[in-house]
Image (cartoon, grey):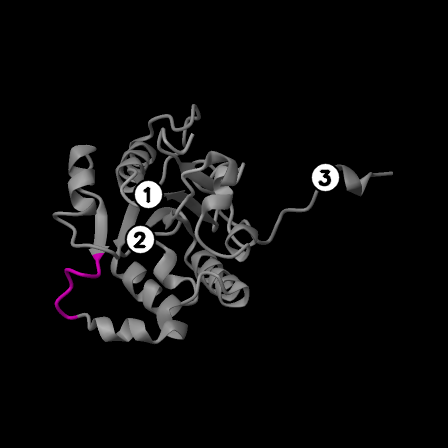
């Protein structure tokens, strides 16, 4: 007589893997947050380089992945994120930079409900094969148009996750932090609670990492 409970069923939501599945869940949205200028993009560049090249990250050996790409949203590539990838020794990363695309009309971003579809227009330009890793720097623009609106943020996260799973991609994205009080007694005890946005940002994303400056600690 067999014990069917001894073998848990496979999860239909995880049909593929990521380079570090326990830290970057396959098909998931993981966040690297921090204050503006603290070094998020620099750290992201180093992490994506190491994951692409099979170097240990967080003390864990990543599995091989077919490709890594990034959607750059906030500044031009050469003087922005591209400089950090150059310094990290990974200038060959596949990238799409919104600001540098002469064919893109920024007024399309005014339609906040269309931004999820727009993000994946950008993603599809990277031509990433299944099981690849996708960076987005930053993710805030694509989260429903109002980060403190729980409903809008939650729905945007669900839309993004659905499209990631369809493409068999895993996302790690930068996110901004709230302004913090100079008085340490008035600050949140958990660093992740300083991430800008509603609690939907925590409930509907996966791993949350926070890069803190010495002043914040």
In this rendering, is residue 212 above or below 163? above
The residue that label 2 is drawn on is 128
Estimate the x, y position of residue 121 in percent, counting from the top left: 30, 66
Q: Is residue 156 left or right of residue 50?
A: right
N-terminal label among 3 and 1:
3
Cα–Cα span, label 3 and label 1:
30 Å
Cα–Cα span, label 1 and label 2:
8 Å
Residues rendered magenta in the picture: 97-103
Residue at 43% from the left image edge and 23% from the top image edge: 59
Q: Are marks 3 and 1 in contact (CB under 8 Å)?
A: no
Mark number, residue 138? none
Q: Which secondary structure class fits the magenta region best?
A: loop
Label 2 crowd (10 A; few <14 / some 14-19 / many >=20): some
Front-most of residues 60 and 76: 76
Q: Helix or strand or loop: what does disc 2 sit on?
A: loop
The residue that label 3 is drawn on is 7
Residue at 60% from the left image edge and 53% from the top image edge: 12
Quadrant assignment for the C terminus = top left
The residue that label 1 is drawn on is 66
N-terminal label among 2 and 3:
3
* Residue 193 showing in the rendered view: yes
N-terminal label among 1 and 2:
1
Q: Which quadrant of the view contains residue 110?
A: bottom left
In this rendering, is residue 132 above or below 141? above
Q: Are marks 1 and 2 in contact (CB under 8 Å)?
A: yes
Front-most of residues 114 and 150: 150
Q: Is residue 162 left or right of residue 173?
A: right
């Amino acid at each position: 007589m067999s014990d069917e409970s001894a073998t848990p069923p496979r999860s239909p939501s995880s049909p593929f893997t990521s380079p570090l599945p326990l830290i970057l869940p396959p098909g998931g949205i993981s966040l690297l947050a921090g204050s503006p200028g603290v070094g998020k993009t620099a750290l992201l560049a180093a992490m994506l380089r190491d994951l692409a090249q099979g170097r240990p990250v967080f003390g864990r050996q990543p599995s091989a992945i077919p490709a890594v790409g990034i959607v750059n949203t906030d500044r031009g590539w050469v003087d922005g994120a591209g400089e950090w990838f150059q310094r990290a020794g990974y200038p060959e990363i596949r990238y799409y930079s919104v600001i540098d695309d002469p064919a893109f009309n920024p007024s399309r971003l005014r339609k906040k409900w269309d931004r999820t579809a727009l993000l994946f227009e950008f993603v599809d330009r990277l031509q990433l094969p299944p099981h690849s890793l996708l960076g987005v720097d930053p993710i805030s623009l694509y989260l429903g148009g109002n980060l403190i609106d729980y409903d809008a943020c939650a729905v945007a996260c669900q839309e993004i996750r659905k499209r990631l799973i369809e493409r068999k991609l895993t996302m790690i994205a930068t996110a901004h932090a709230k302004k913090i009080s100079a008085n340490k007694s008035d600050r949140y005890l958990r660093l992740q609670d300083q991430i800008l946005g509603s609690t939907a940002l925590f409930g509907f994303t996966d791993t949350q990492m926070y890069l803190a400056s010495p002043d914040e600690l």
